[in-house]
Image: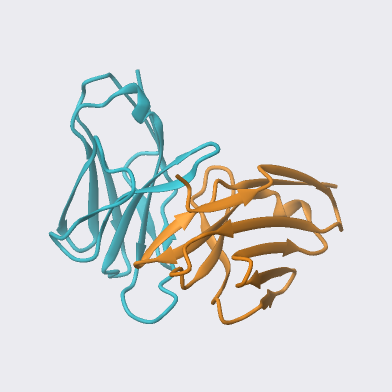
Amino acid sequence: QQQVKQSPQSLIVQKGGISIINCAYENTAFDYFPWYQQFPGKGPALLIAIRPDVSEKKEGRFTISFNKSAKQFSLHIMDSQPGDSATYFCAARGDYKLSFGAGTTVTVRA
Amino acid sequence: DVKVTQSSRYLVKRTGEKVFLECVQDMDHENMFWYRQDPGLGLRLIYFSYDVKMKEKGDIPEGYSVSREKKERFSLILESASTNQTSMYLCASSRTGGFYNEQFFGPGTRLTVL
């Protein structure tokens, strides 16, 4: 069973729009929540990450919002660009291991 | 830059064959991981190793084994390949210590078992 549930499975956004990907978890022992970005033919690469004692983290056009009480976190991609077209995975760390969500394929239309 | 390399990008094997997937990292990382990636399931951890000759089972170890004889090299072994092991296999490495311990991934090996 997947420890981290991710939605939607895919989304299409116009250039300049906002992409939002949501993740939920149950294990309160998770202590670190990274997002990975994967382009076709490449391995995933760390995009941005947050600790559970922080409610928001922003790096450029990418923002993580974290709601500890709801056990949910989300990735917002502002001003989406065609170069952002990729698959995004949320993850959560417990016992030094990462549990990944199922992934969201984001397509940005020019 | 950290580099994680995997021996093959594409591999086609027959059912029952023994398959070796090799992974090498060049950043002296202590930890190494093997995942499989399937559509709709994300990345699932097969095995990981936190030191030479050490290994720990991940979430889906059945049908797989691993070997880590040198710090930079981590091998995934399919003793008798089956069609349900057709997948993308990703290797990753990370450092021990500190809080963030980013995992760096290789490009993956797409294995097809016929």
* Residue A29: percent from left, percent from top: 43, 70
* Quarter occupied by the C terminus of chain B: top left
Above/below status of B78 relative to A4: above
Asked if residue A87 can be seen in this view, the reply is no
Query: How many numbered discs sit on the rendered protein?
Result: 0
What is the basis of the colouring in this image?
by chain
The structure residue drawn at horizontal position 30% and vertical position 51%, both measured from the top left corner, is B58
- Chain in orange in the render: A
Q: Nearer the viewer, residue A57 or A2?
A: A2
The structure residue drawn at horizontal position 48% and vertical position 47%, both measured from the top left corner, is A2
* Residue B57: percent from left, percent from top: 25, 51
* Residue B36: percent from left, percent from top: 40, 42
* Residue A49: percent from left, percent from top: 56, 71
The answer to whether A21 appears left or right of B107 in the picture is right
The structure residue drawn at horizontal position 24% and vertical position 61%, both measured from the top left corner, is B72
The structure residue drawn at horizontal position 41% and vertical position 33%, both measured from the top left corner, is B87
Asked if residue B97 can be seen in this view, the reply is yes
The answer to whether A99 appears left or right of B71 in the picture is right
Above/below status of A17 relative to A106: below
Q: Quadrant for residue A72, please give it.
A: bottom right
* Quarter occupied by the N terminus of chain B: bottom left
- Chain in cyan in the render: B
Above/below status of B9 relative to B34: above
